[in-house]
Image (cartoon, grey):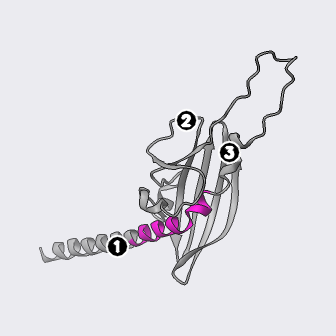
Amino acid sequence: MIGNFKIIGIIFLFLIFSCKKQNGAIEDGRELITENINVLLDSVEFFDTSRMPVSSVSLKDFKKYKPVKIKQIKIGLLDSITNENLTSNEKSKFVKFNIGKNEIFNFRSKYIIEILKINNYDSNILFVKFSNFRIENNLANIEVKKVSGISMTHHKYYFKKKNGRWVFIKKELLGIG
């Protein structure tokens, strides 16, 4: 009987320590996103069609031609960090959590940012999704996918913790379309 309590106690202690480790990684993840939101949301202008020049058209070619006015895009940040295309053994090494307004308050840009639950395929919103977020030994990497209509970029960002702050190291292109 006492042996059963020892086993239960050991399992309970293991669960407590693994939860503390995961919570520490989540706090580090929130800190990384807060400090580097402007880095993670770079190259928004690439998707902004309102910045494209509209060429003038001859009036004799088009009698009632009116140039199309396109509104500036908004950024729609999907609220949860997910793990995609990973095996079950790999998933335990990655961090998952929901993003809130506290993580994006440092965002400085002329673009409006909103936190969204789902991608509704609105053509005037650049949908940004964070995935496969890994933090280990003061090193971190996160994948960022930006989608607007049929345009997409997929990058992996690398960070290192120096003097208590997450510092951007490099960005790797994973896909474009």
Asked if marks 2 and 3 touch (Cβ < 8 Å), the reply is: no
Q: Residues within 10 Å of mark 1 (few under 14, many from 20)?
A: few
Question: How would you rate the neighbour count of disc 3 (Cα within 10 Å): few for under 14, some for 14-19, many for 20 or more?
Answer: many
Which circle marks residue 138 in the picture?
none
- Which residue sits at x=27%, y=75%? 13
Secondary structure type for disc 3? helix
Q: Is residue 11 above or below residue 56?
A: below
**Occupied quadrant, residue 43:** bottom right
The part of the chain drawn in magenta is 24-41
Mark 2 and mark 3 lie on one chain; the one further toward the N terminus is 3
How far apart marks 1 and 2 lie (CA) works out to 38 Å
Instruction: Please tell me whether residue 35 is drawn above or below residue 112 in the rendered image.
Output: below
Q: Which residue is found at the position 67% from the left and 44% from the top?
A: 48
Residue at which label 1 appears: 20
Q: Amino acid at mark 1?
A: Lys
Tell whether label 2 touches label 1 (CB within 8 Å).
no
Q: Secondary structure at mark 2?
A: loop
Rendered-image quadrant of the N terminus: bottom left
- Residue 70 in view in this figure: yes
Is residue 115 found left or right of 6 in the rendered image? right
The nearer-to-camera label among 3 and 1 is 3
In the picture, the disc for residue 47 is 3
Q: Which residue is mark 2?
A: 121
Q: Position of residue 146 (x, y in %)?
A: 61, 48
Q: Does dot 1 land on a helix, a strand or a loop?
A: helix
Residues 89 and 150: in front is 150
Q: Residue at x 48, y 48 (%)?
A: 114
Q: CA separation, marks 3 and 1? A: 40 Å
Q: Is residue 37 magenta?
A: yes
Q: 10 Å neighbourhood of mark 2: few (<14), some, or many (≥20)?
A: few
Magenta-drawn stretch contains 5:
no
